[in-house]
Image: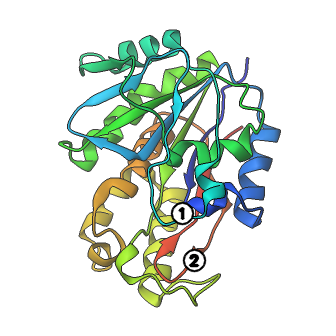
Amino acid sequence: MSTMPAAFLGHGNPMNALEHNRYTEAWSAFAQEAPRPTAVLAVSAHWYVNRSAVTAMATPRTIHDFTGFPQALFDVDYPAPGSPETAARVASALAPVKVELDEGTWGLDHGTWSLLVHLYPNADVPVVQLSIDASLAIEGYFALGRALAPLRDEGVMIIASGNIVHNLSVIDWRAVGRGAPWAERFDEKVHDVMVSDPTELAHMVRDPDYPLAVPTPEHFVPLAYFAGLADASSEAVQTLVSGCELGSLSMTSYAIKS
């Protein structure tokens, strides 16, 4: 079997779960072009805790971890099965890092299901979600991504869900289809790194635009997992879709695929 693709998807506004636009169309096309995976492993910005854990329940719940959105978004249910077997494989792949097998605490948060409703709308592919250990430096996430790479050869699609630029404090609701100059600039600099040498991603934390683009790290570090996957692969990183929205969000998405 060919190596399963992996992706970093900029999930942005939760309303993308309900909308059809150029971003969601790119995500859907990515899944349609890929072989059917045995399972999906998602690394979401919204499970950011002080430990590494992986969902290991047979039926993960749909988590609505947001406020202030229309009822239609709270009504979304994504009843994908879990995969305790895949969860155990994730834990073994990351050894000697201790990974808790979570059998009842978490589930699938909107960083995961807002993407998967477009990738696999029938919710018929098993899904497990890996937490982000907030105690690590960016190099640690890169190493975890490298360690997860063998799962791609076992039929597991790995998706990292976050945003390269994510600053909710300065959102401009009038800036549909564009970012502020600093947001566009940082997004472009990260793009240059990702398509040339993903190992250089860690240097972006010293970029002068980083503090404004990444005021808190949880949405940025999923890209480091993806960069580690890319470094472990001989395949080039491809841009699925690019662009900024509402002034201070990047929706740019990348893939590793044959």
Q: Position of residue 141 (x, y in %)?
A: 32, 41
Which quarter of the figure has residue 183?
bottom left
**Element type at marker 2?**
strand
Q: Which quadrant does the C terminus fall into?
A: top right
Residue visible at 51% across and 48% down?
Answer: 111
Give me the C-alpha separation between circle 1 and circle 2.
8 Å
Residue visible at 54% across and 63% down?
Answer: 12
In-front residue for pair 162/107: 107
Which quarter of the figure has residue 219?
bottom left
Q: Which quadrant does the N terminus fall into?
A: top right
| Residue contact between numbered discs 1 and 2, judged by CB atoms under 8 Å | yes
Residue at label 1?
12
Q: In the displayed structure, does residue 49 sit left or right of residue 224? A: left
Q: Position of residue 40 (x, y in %)?
A: 60, 29
Residue visible at 39% across and 25% down?
Answer: 54
Answer yes or no: is residue 220 visible: no
**Element type at marker 1?**
loop
Answer yes or no: is residue 80 visible: yes
Residue at label 2?
245
Residue visible at 48% across and 88% down?
Answer: 180
In-front residue for pair 210/233: 210
Q: In the displayed structure, does residue 17 sit left or right of residue 48? A: right
Amino acid of disc 2: Glu
Amino acid of disc 1: Gly
Which of marks 2 and 1 precedes in the sequence? Answer: 1
User: How dense is the environment of label 2, judged by Cα within 10 Å: few (below 14), some, or many (20 and up)?
Assistant: many
Q: Position of residue 220 (x, y in %)?
A: 38, 57
